[in-house]
Amino acid sequence: MSRNIKITLAILGVAVVIGLLSLRGLHDRVSRLAQDEATEEQLKAHFDNYDPPGWFEARGRLGAYASDAVLDALEAASLAHSEVRARYAHRDALREQIRLAQESGRPQAAPDGQTMLDAHRQIDPALQEAEVKDELLIKLMRDELRSKPGAAALPAAVPVRRRRFWHRRQRATVPPLR
């Protein structure tokens, strides 16, 4: 056996031993984390009944706790998805026009093939744009969470909204008492 092969086998053997020791240490830590049966049943029942927040609740949480950059990225992604929905709606409206023209016996009233192709071709770029905006939003949110890892685990206080100045205008219109 050549010297290089012996060195490689020795390094590989050390790596296997280190891996086995790490695996044993991981097993010991996990076994220490195990709860009693009642606690595990309570946790299982809690997570089985957990209902993730709906869209409006999630959007409200984002509005309350997200940074301005995340909110801007969310708005851009929402606009991109609205554009996708509009392109699909346009294509579906053209299909409905074709169906109605065929049912009425006037196929010349239907949109031509080029119009349908153009409508269909406009969908893919809109989908790609929406996907890019989604990926940008996800990346931005992950970067912010990684920059503040403790913030994800701590309960966040509800942010205080700045008071509008409508109460000052209202006072100005009421004549002062003399």
Image (cartoon, rainbow, N blue to C red):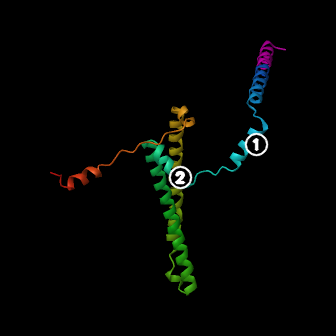
Q: Looking at the figure, which quarter contains the N terminus? A: top right
For the residue pair 46 and 119, the one nearer the viewer reads as 46
Q: Work out whether residue 128 can be spotted.
A: no
Q: Mark 2 is on which residue type?
A: Glu
Along the line of sight, which residue is nearer the eye, 112 or 21?
21
Please provide percent x and percent y for residue 152. 55, 37
Furthest residue in direction bottom, as rendered: 105
User: Residue drawn at (29%, 52%), measured in percent from left and top?
Assistant: 166
Figure quadrant of residue 107: bottom right
Whether residue 164 is visible, yes or no, is yes
Determine which residue is flagged by label 2.
57
1 vs 2, front mark? 1
Task: Give the extent of the magenta segment.
Answer: 1-14
Residue at 79% over, 12% down: 3
Q: Secondary structure at mark 1?
A: helix
> x%, y% of residue 160?
41, 42
How many numbered discs sit on the rendered protein?
A: 2
Chief secondary structure of the magenta span? Answer: helix
Mark-to-mark CA distance, 1 and 2: 28 Å
Which residue is disc 1 drawn over? 41
Q: Residue at x 69, y 50 (%)?
A: 49
Tell me the element at label 2: helix
* Disc 1 residue type (three-letter): Glu
Q: In this picture, is 77 found above or below 43?
A: below
Q: Is residue 22 above or below residue 141?
A: above
